[in-house]
Image (cartoon, rainbow, N blue to C red):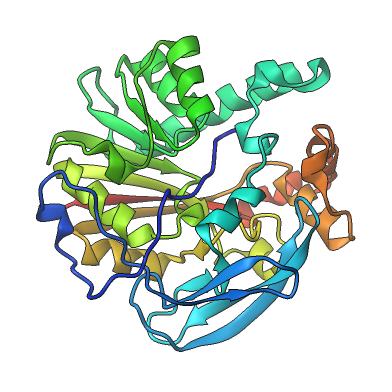
């Protein structure tokens, strides 16, 4: 199971217009491109915001499905829709930024460092983190080539910093992590002695065109304003640099099979569900060429979807439950390649 932190942006607000040239601007905080149409109070008392399409600003959409917060079995139902103009799949209406914070408790599994877990799962978590960081590095280098010690890189939503620590250990390159969780930033500095920035990519105010690589591992689906993040990534990258985005593979068979009980749906923390075509279009509008889209899977992840489908909700409240649920994926191991649940998309700055 992945240990990488998944999180949301620090702000989303109404804006007028849709300037696609922000990657040409100086190091200023990018404006939000997600237009909030109205704010409402749900039947279960949560503040929600109805939005235009986060990528094209169209208002018309079609209903896809409705589901709940299966991980914590919280009250409320959330609608997933498809934009009638550009086909982006997204949650609408969605919790406001303040309301979203409730869905990211301190014991959220992506925040849990292996050394803080019960001894029974501690070593499994550490081994899993190392294994997946190494696989992510291999998958990345298969497309962009071997990283060098001189490679300038950042990881947006770095969480526990597993990927950047692996890059430093294996390639000698010291990347900078960016995360809104202050506890994660302190851990990176204290435990790894590596640079980290508390806040969002826009708030980091990085210089123009100095980076070779921007990574976003299980991050963009949590971002209320994905277009601003992609535009800001282009601004800080050198021409020819790369952005690497790991996201749920919404076009895959598991997503179609399990629908509202698909574990990678993870409502309402996951707000955006890019597919190859919608991601390619969005990247192209902001100065990137999509050079690779690699669907892949994580063994045992399917077991969690099976538990959800059978009504076993609230796995996030027990540190052992996700591991036992994942074990149900054993019978499907021979078929894992045909059941991708994630994808690594790589864009080249042009």
Q: Residue at x 80, y 20 (%)?
A: 118
Comparing 190 with 126, the one in front is: 190
Position of 127 compared to 62: left or right? right
Comparing 128 with 335, the one in front is: 128
Where is 114 relative to 141, above or below?
above
Image location (x, y in percent) of residue 266: 66, 56
Quadrant holding the C terminus? bottom left
Residue 186 visible to the viewer: yes
* Image quadrant assignment for residue 226: bottom left
Image location (x, y in percent) of residue 37: 43, 79
Where is 188 relative to 16, above or below?
above
Position of 254 compared to 328: left or right? left
Comparing 93 with 169, the one in front is: 93
Image location (x, y in percent) of residue 125: 68, 24
Position of 310 compared to 103: left or right? right
* Image quadrant assignment for residue 178: top left
Quadrant holding the N terminus? top right
Image location (x, y in percent) of residue 189: 43, 15
Comparing 213 with 147, the one in front is: 213
What is the total number of numbered labels drawn onto the structure image? Answer: 0
Where is 191 relative to 292, above or below?
above
Q: Residue at x 33, y 17 (%)?
A: 171
Position of 20 compared to 144: left or right? left
């Amino acid at each position: 199971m992945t240990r990488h932190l998944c999180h949301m942006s620090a702000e989303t607000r109404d804006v007028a217009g849709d300037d696609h040239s922000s990657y040409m601007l100086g190091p200023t905080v990018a404006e939000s491109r997600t237009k909030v149409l109205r704010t409402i109070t749900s039947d279960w008392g949560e503040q929600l915001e109805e939005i235009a399409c986060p990528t094209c600003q169209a208002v018309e959409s079609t209903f896809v499905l409705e589901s709940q917060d299966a991980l914590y079995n919280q009250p409320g139902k959330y609608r997933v829709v498809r934009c009638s103009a550009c086909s982006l799949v997204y949650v609408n209406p969605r919790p406001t930024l303040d309301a979203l914070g409730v869905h990211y408790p301190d014991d959220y599994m992506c925040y849990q460092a292996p050394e803080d877990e019960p001894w029974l799962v501690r070593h499994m978590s550490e081994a899993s983190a190392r294994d997946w960081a190494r696989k992510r590095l291999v998958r990345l280098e298969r497309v962009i080539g071997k990283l060098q010690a001189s490679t300038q890189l950042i990881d947006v939503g770095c969480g526990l910093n597993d990927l950047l620590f692996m890059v430093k250990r294996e390639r000698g390159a010291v990347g900078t992590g960016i995360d809104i969780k202050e506890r994660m930033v302190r851990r990176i500095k204290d435990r790894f002695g590596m640079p980290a920035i508390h806040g969002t990519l826009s708030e980091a105010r990085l210089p123009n065109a100095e980076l070779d690589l921007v990574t976003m591992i299980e991050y963009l689906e949590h971002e209320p304003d994905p277009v601003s993040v992609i535009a800001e990534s282009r601004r800080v990258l050198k021409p020819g640099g790369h952005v690497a985005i790991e996201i749920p593979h919404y076009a895959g068979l598991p997503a179609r099979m399990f629908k509202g009980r698909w574990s990678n749906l993870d409502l309402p923390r996951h707000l955006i569900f890019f597919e190859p075509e919608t991601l390619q279009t969005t990247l192209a509008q902001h100065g990137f060429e999509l050079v690779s889209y690699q669907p892949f899977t994580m063994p045992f992840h399917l077991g969690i979807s099976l538990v959800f489908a059978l009504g076993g909700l609230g796995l996030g409240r027990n540190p052992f439950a996700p591991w036992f649920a994942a074990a149900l994926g054993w019978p499907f191991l021979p078929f894992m390649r045909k059941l991708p649940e994630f994808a690594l998309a790589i864009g080249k700055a042009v």
